[in-house]
Image (cartoon, rainbow, N blue to C red):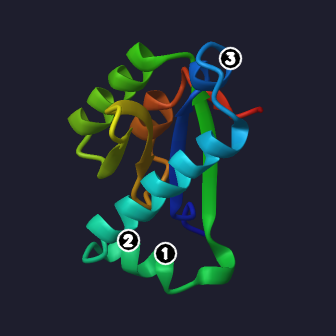
């Protein structure tokens, strides 16, 4: 059986720990990013396949320590040609999180997310 299509949503942990954002506010950022990436990639085969089976969607919500780590992850994903959206809270223009389009967990993808941990509030 093929590895399931999975969306990876990555949140900055320092938004809660250092900047005092509520967990709900951070979850809203993740929702914005995941909705935006599905909209922007709706023509891709993997996105269409993912959305065709709503009862079996896979998402992994991860965290990174801070902005520097999130920017580094975004650059790594870009280098691997992994479609993703970086979400910026407006009007402050704060880079809060990113979400990949539905992708398979290749060894390169696993390596890119190696420094992330599961999100914990």
Seen at 68% across and 81% down, the residue is: 55
| C-alpha gap between disc 1 and disc 2 | 6 Å
Q: Could you tell me residue 5's position as x and y percent?
A: 51, 64
The reply, left or right, for residue 117 in relation to residue 96 is: right
> Viewer-proximal residue, 103 or 42?
42
Q: Distance between the residues labelled 3 and 2?
A: 35 Å
Q: Residue 46 carries which label?
A: 2
Per the image, label 1 sits on a secondary structure element best described as: helix
Most foreground residue, 58 or 69: 69
Q: What kind of element bears circle 3?
A: helix
Q: Name the residue under label 1.
A: 50
| C-beta proximity under 8 Å, tags 3 and 2 | no
Q: Is 30 situated left or right of 35 in this image?
A: right
Looking at the rendering, which quadrant does residue 117 occupy? Answer: top right
The image position of residue 96, as x and y in percent, is 45, 34
Q: Is mark 2 on a helix, strand or loop?
A: helix
Tell which circle, 3 or 2, labels the residue nearer the N-terminal end.
3
Q: Which residue is drawn at 41% across and 51% down?
A: 100
Kindly check if marks 1 and 3 are in contact, taking CB atoms under 8 A apart as contact: no
**Residue 21: image location, x then y, percent:** 63, 29
Q: Disc 3 vs disc 2: which is toward the camera?
A: 3
Q: Distance between the residues labelled 1 and 3?
A: 33 Å
Q: From the image, which quarter does the N terminus lie in?
A: bottom right
Q: How crowded is mark 1: few (under 14 residues within 10 Å), some or many (20 or more)?
A: many
Which mark lies nearer to you, 1 or 3? Answer: 3
Whether the residues at callouts 1 and 2 have beta carbons within 8 Å, the answer is yes
Q: Name the residue under label 3.
A: 17
Q: Quadrant of the C terminus?
A: top right
- Residue farthest right in this picture: 121
Which residue appears at 24% of the width and 37% of the height? 78
């Amino acid at each position: 059986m093929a590895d399931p299509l999975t969306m990876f949503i990555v949140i900055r942990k320092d938004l809660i720990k250092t900047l005092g954002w509520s967990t709900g506010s951070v979850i809203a950022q993740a929702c914005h990013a995941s909705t935006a990436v599905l909209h922007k990639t709706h023509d891709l085969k993997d996105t269409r396949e993912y959305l065709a089976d709503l009862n079996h969607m896979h998402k992994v919500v991860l965290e990174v320590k801070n902005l520097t780590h999130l920017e580094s992850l975004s650059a790594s994903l870009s280098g691997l040609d992994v479609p993703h959206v970086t979400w910026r809270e407006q009007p402050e223009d704060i880079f809060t999180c990113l979400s990949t389009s539905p992708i398979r967990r290749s060894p390169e993808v696993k390596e890119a997310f190696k420094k992330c941990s599961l999100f914990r509030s």
